[in-house]
Image: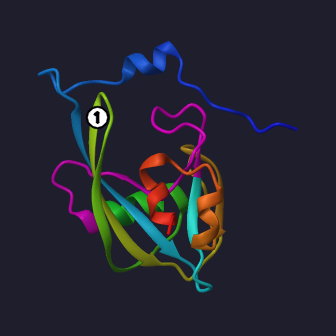
Amino acid sequence: MRPKTCSMDDETAGRQGHDGNGGPRLYLCVKGIIRDPKGRVLLLKRTCETLVDPGKWDLPGGKLDPGELFDDAFRREVREETGLDVTIVGIAGAWDWRTQDRHVAYLFIEATSGHCGVALSSEHTDWMWIEPHRAADLDVAPQFARLFTA
């Protein structure tokens, strides 16, 4: 059985926007490198209906709400997407990702979770705890792939 592939239709592509001045929109996002007690990292598989990276493996996290602090946004997003409460360990890094219509600044937060059971939100269809070196073999969203390469 072949895996289901995802593609962006014209309607989805039309929802992508610009900043009003012709430039790409700027987003601030927090993403988590969440480890379980065995040192594995949590990945979530995005739905095929999502606007960004449909069907790709993703890290938990998302956009900040206006006025929201990074750590509060991170905990909120992780709880919404996975049902997990996490302990923040530190900052794992930061970089930006640009496409034709968006510019995303990512802050990567390192965290731990004592629980391995995940309650997915509607944004994702699957989840896995995986050894970081094995994640490079998956169809990870391109902006996060370099986290898992040597």
Which residue lies most toward the top here?
10
Q: 9 or 74: which is nearer to us?
A: 9
Task: Check residue 53 for magenta coloring.
Answer: yes
Q: In this view, does 130 lie above or below 96?
A: below
Task: Kindly give the residue lying farthest to the front in the view shown.
Answer: 150
Identify whether 66 is placed above or below 36: above
Residue at 53% over, 24% down = 8
Residue 37 appears at what percent x and percent y?
A: 59, 86
Task: Report the side of 27 relative to 49 (left or right).
Answer: left
Work out whether 34 lies above or below 44: below
* Residue 69 locus on image (x, y percent): 21, 63
Q: Where is residue 80 in the image (x, y as percent from the top left)?
A: 47, 56
The residue beneath circle 1 is 102
Q: Tell me which amino acid carries mark 1.
A: Arg
Q: Can residue 118 be seen in this view?
A: no
Q: Which residue is drawn at 31% across and 28% down?
A: 100
Q: Give the range drawn in magenta.
A: 45-72
Residue 28 appears in the picture as rendered: yes
Residue positioned most to the right: 1
Name the image quarter holding residue 19: top left
In front of the other: 81 or 55: 55
Is 84 on the left-hand or right-hand side of 72? right
Secondary structure, magenta segment, majority class: loop
Colouring convention used in this rendered image of the protein: rainbow
- Residue at 37% x, 66% y: name it: 75
Judging depth in this view, the residue of 35 and 131 nearest the camera is 131
Q: Residue at x 65, y 58 (%)?
A: 137
In the rendered image, residue 120, in percent from the top left (x then y), is placed at 60, 54
